[in-house]
Every structure is written in structure tokens, then in C-alpha cells.
Image: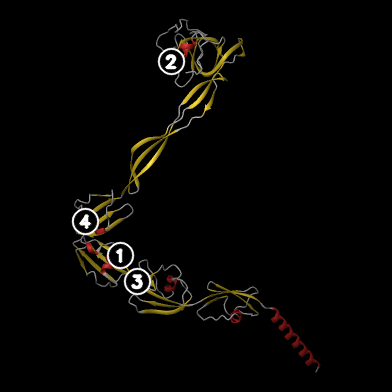
């Protein structure tokens, strides 16, 4: 009797615990039916029980994840893919299969029925051709019609053969699929309206191959016409504007049947070129000699040209300037040049010097027998002999510098007394030596102009 009471008490406690567990285990369950989201509250232990709690019913063909018999996790997410009715028809309208499946990618759906799709096959959904690699939109029922491609052998007049595949039903459709225009062929066997079988042979007679080369593609067909213009008309290619063909459209079709069409267009563009401004020099008494500053900035002018550009097949072939005009004139820049003479002193190995100008020049050297001629000559333009202390300058400098005292570091004091050729683009001097004390010079140096300051000063050195 005592044991019976213990068993009864234990059963009561277990029942109470299960009741508490059941009442306290209610939790949200997320359910996706295709792309629609539902959230329910459930105490279910399995996926099937949770779906019943949410009023969701499924069929054996539907795809439920996790499966119906799976235990429900603590934070459950259930995904359901609905099976749809699919009716698959042959090209003649006879039904091939009727099934309910979850799969919505047509290629995979047909593969499940042992049907492999080839590139030239056609698959229609509700009468419209579809991409077999993309999922079908969600629908309750699908009507699919499969048109398998047929192999066609096309024998040409030169006994060559073209193999084509088409999902069309007639000889005419097969010829179009192979790139032939039936209207350009004189004789076809079997006739254009004949139905295609599993492996149809088409004999083309009395046709002439035509190849029309465009910029981005080549059109291949057959023709019986005589001129290039007629051949282009049959291929649907028209010459417009400046377009031309090779041979010309009024010429006979060449024996090789090849015609090139060149698309031509012209456009007019405006090109702008800057016109440099000139420097206008004005004296500036506040600025030191040989210094410059901008007094008034210049402005570039603009020259405009109207240019006709010709393109053939997208490539520029020619451009021709039709007219040119000045849109705006340049404005000269006013440059101030210094006219203020400042006398300075400098210590040298020969003693202190006074100078009023210092210019960087390129120095070379010469002597009576090293003057660049085939003979020795001891005279100078001023009449002084060639010796150390006599320097030559360009003709432009000599005209106002003759007799000017100068100092050259490393050479010493000297006087401008001779004329030399100079070096283009450089301020240049030639240092005199006798043949006995000659030193080769080829370097930049500073030329110091010694006092007294002459009355006539070239403010801008040539």
C-alpha cells in the first residue's frame, strides 16, 4: 500500500512538470513559404506540429526544410518550397509529362525527365520563348512546349556542304537558320514548305554565294542577281548618305561574290589653339639692372578652326580645316626691366674691384694659333695683340662694349677688344692668351663689368 502511494505521487509530479514545461515552452517560429514570411507562436516539438499550429498544410511534393519529422530547434526557421503543376508538351502539341515539382529552372526541370537541352532547342512558356537557365516566375501551373533542334545538311552547287541545326519545322526555316535567304535561291529540293524530319538533306541549285562584309559582321547568302546594288538590296543592306561599296553598287557582282560595305559619316568640330602673347618691355627705374618683373600680365588669344572629320566604319580617315578665325586677340605682357645701376665692390686675388654689372656667360679661350682657323693671327678687331687680358665677344656686344674693363674669376682683369662668333643661345666670351701661356676654357663664369659706368648702357643684353 505504501509503494502504491509513492508511485502515484511520482506520476503526479511528472505530470505537473510536463505541464509546466509545455506551458512555458511557447516561442516564435519563423516560416518562409517561397518568399513570404510568417511568424507564429507555438509549443510544438516537431516541424510538422509547428506547421499545423500555423495552419500551414503541405503536400508530399513540397520541399520542407528542416524535414517534417525533425525536432524543432529553440529558434526555429522553416522554409517551404511549393511544388507546382508542370505540363510538358512536344512540338506537335502532344503532352510528354505531367508532374508536380519544386524545381523552377526549365533546364533542370527537363533534365529530371531525361531531356537534355541543346543550344538550338526552343522552350516556350505560355507561347513565349524563355531562357532555360533562369527560374520561371512563381505560378500555380506551367505549360511548357519543347521544340528540339533538328540536324539539316545543306548541299551547295559547288558540292560543299553546310551543317545546321534548327528548331523550325520547315525547309525555309532551316535555310534561314543557316544564314541563307530562300528568296535568293533559284531551286531548292525539297521545297521550302516541306516539313523537316530527323535528318533532312536540302539540295540548293543554281545559286551563287554572296558575302557582304560589314564593319562588325559578314552576311553570307546566295543570289542570282547581276549587280552589286541588287545583291545588297536582297541582303537588306542599304547605302545611305556617304556610304559606298567595293565594288560600286552600279558594277557587276564580282566572280568571288564578295562585296564590302563601308559606312561613312562626317562631323564638323571646332578646334581651339592658343595664340601666344608678346612681351613688351618698359623701363623700370626702381628695379636694379638685369632684373625683370611683370608690370601687366599678358593674355593668350584664341584661334578657332572649323574642321570636317571623315569616319569610315568608325575609324577616322581624314580631317580638313574649312575655315579659321581669331576669336580673341592676344594681349601683350608688359615686362619691366631694371635701369637702376648699383655699384658694388668685391675682393679678388688681384685686389678689390668696383663693378656695376655681373652677368653669367659661357667662356672659351683662344690664342694666335688657336683661333679656329688654319693660320696663326695675332691681331684683334680693336688693333690690340692677342694676349692675356684681351677678350672677344659677339658682334652685338662689341659695338657698345669695346674698351669696357671687366673681371673674370680665375682669369683676372681684362678689356673687351675683339669679336668672335659666339655660341647660339648663350651669353659668350672668348678669353685671350698667347700661344705660350694658353689655357683651355669651357665653362660658365661670372663676367663683372668694372667702373666707370659708361654713359650708354644697353639695358637688355642681346
Instruction: First in sequence, mark 4 or 2: give its number.
Output: 4
Q: Regarding mark 1 in the picture, which secondary structure is present there? A: helix
Instruction: First in sequence, mark 3 or 4: give its number.
Output: 3
Query: Would you name the residue on which mark 3 appears?
Result: 148
Q: Nearer the viewer, mark 3 or mark 4?
A: 4
**Is residue 409 visible in the rendered structure shown here?**
no
Disc 1 vs disc 2: Cβ atoms closer than 8 Å? Answer: no
What separation in Å lies between label 2 and label 3 (alpha carbons)? 93 Å
Query: Would you name the residue on which mark 2 appears?
Result: 421
Q: Residue at x 35, y 79 (%)?
A: 94
Relative vertical location of residue 240 with respect to residue 76 in this rendering, above or below: above
Give the x, y percent position of residue 176.
Answer: 28, 64
What separation in Å lies between label 1 and label 2 (alpha carbons)? 83 Å
Relative vertical location of residue 445 with respect to residue 212 in this rendering, above or below: above
Disc 3 vs disc 4: Cβ atoms closer than 8 Å? Answer: no
Q: Regarding mark 2 in the picture, which secondary structure is present there? A: loop
Say few, some or many: other residues with alpha carbon within 10 Å of mark 3 (under 14 / 14 to 19 / 20 or more): many
In the figure, is residue 97 to the left or right of 427? left
Q: Of residues 35 and 97, which is closer to you in this image?
A: 35
Examine the image and state in which quarter residue 127 appears.
bottom left
Amino acid at each position: 500500500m505504501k509503494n502504491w502511494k509513492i508511485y502515484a505521487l511520482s506520476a503526479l509530479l511528472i505530470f505537473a512538470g510536463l505541464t509546466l514545461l509545455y506551458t512555458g515552452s511557447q516561442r516564435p517560429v519563423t516560416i518562409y513559404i517561397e518568399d513570404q514570411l510568417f511568424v507564429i507562436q507555438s509549443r510544438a516539438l516537431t516541424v510538422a506540429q509547428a506547421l499545423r499550429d500555423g495552419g500551414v498544410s503541405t503536400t508530399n511534393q513540397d520541399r520542407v526544410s528542416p524535414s517534417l519529422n525533425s525536432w524543432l530547434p529553440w529558434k526555429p526557421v522553416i522554409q517551404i518550397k511549393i511544388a507546382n503543376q508542370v505540363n510538358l508538351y512536344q512540338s506537335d502539341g502532344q503532352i510528354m509529362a505531367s508532374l508536380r515539382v519544386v524545381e523552377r529552372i526549365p533546364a533542370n526541370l527537363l533534365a529530371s525527365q531525361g531531356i537534355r537541352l541543346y543550344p538550338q532547342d526552343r522552350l516556350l512558356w505560355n507561347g513565349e520563348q524563355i531562357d532555360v537557365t533562369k527560374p520561371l516566375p512563381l505560378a500555380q501551373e506551367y505549360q511548357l512546349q519543347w521544340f528540339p533542334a533538328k540536324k539539316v545538311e545543306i548541299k551547295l552547287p559547288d558540292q560543299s556542304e553546310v551543317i545546321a541545326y534548327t528548331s523550325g519545322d520547315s525547309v525555309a526555316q532551316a535555310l534561314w537558320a543557316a544564314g541563307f535567304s530562300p528568296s535568293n535561291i533559284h531551286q531548292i529540293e525539297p521545297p521550302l514548305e516541306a516539313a523537316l524530319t530527323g535528318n533532312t538533306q536540302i539540295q540548293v541549285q543554281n545559286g551563287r554565294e554572296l558575302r557582304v562584309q560589314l564593319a562588325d559582321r559578314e552576311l553570307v547568302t546566295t543570289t542570282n542577281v547581276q549587280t552589286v546594288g541588287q545583291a545588297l538590296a536582297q541582303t537588306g543592306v542599304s547605302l545611305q548618305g556617304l556610304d559606298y561599296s567595293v565594288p560600286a553598287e552600279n558594277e557587276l557582282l564580282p566572280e568571288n561574290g564578295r562585296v564590302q560595305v563601308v559606312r561613312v559619316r562626317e562631323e564638323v568640330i571646332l578646334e581651339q589653339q592658343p595664340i601666344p602673347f608678346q612681351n613688351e618691355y618698359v623701363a623700370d627705374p626702381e628695379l636694379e639692372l638685369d632684373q625683370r618683373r611683370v608690370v601687366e600680365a599678358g593674355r593668350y588669344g584664341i584661334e578657332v578652326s572649323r574642321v570636317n572629320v571623315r569616319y569610315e566604319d568608325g575609324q577616322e580617315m581624314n580631317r580638313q580645316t574649312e575655315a579659321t578665325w581669331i576669336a580673341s586677340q592676344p594681349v601683350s605682357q608688359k615686362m619691366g626691366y631694371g635701369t637702376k645701376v648699383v655699384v658694388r665692390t668685391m675682393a679678388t686675388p688681384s685686389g678689390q674691384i668696383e663693378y656695376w654689372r655681373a652677368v653669367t656667360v659661357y667662356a672659351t679661350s683662344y690664342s694666335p694659333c688657336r683661333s679656329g682657323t688654319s693660320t696663326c693671327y695675332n691681331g684683334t678687331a680693336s688693333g690690340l695683340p692677342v694676349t692675356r687680358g684681351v677678350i672677344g665677344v659677339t658682334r652685338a656686344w662689341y659695338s657698345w662694349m669695346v674698351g669696357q674693363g671687366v673681371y673674370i674669376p680665375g682669369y683676372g682683369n681684362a678689356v673687351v677688344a675683339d669679336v668672335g662668333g659666339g655660341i647660339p643661345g648663350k651669353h659668350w666670351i672668348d678669353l685671350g692668351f698667347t700661344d705660350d701661356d694658353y689655357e683651355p676654357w669651357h665653362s660658365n663664369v661670372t663676367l663683372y663689368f668694372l667702373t666707370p659706368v659708361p654713359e650708354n648702357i644697353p639695358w637688355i643684353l642681346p
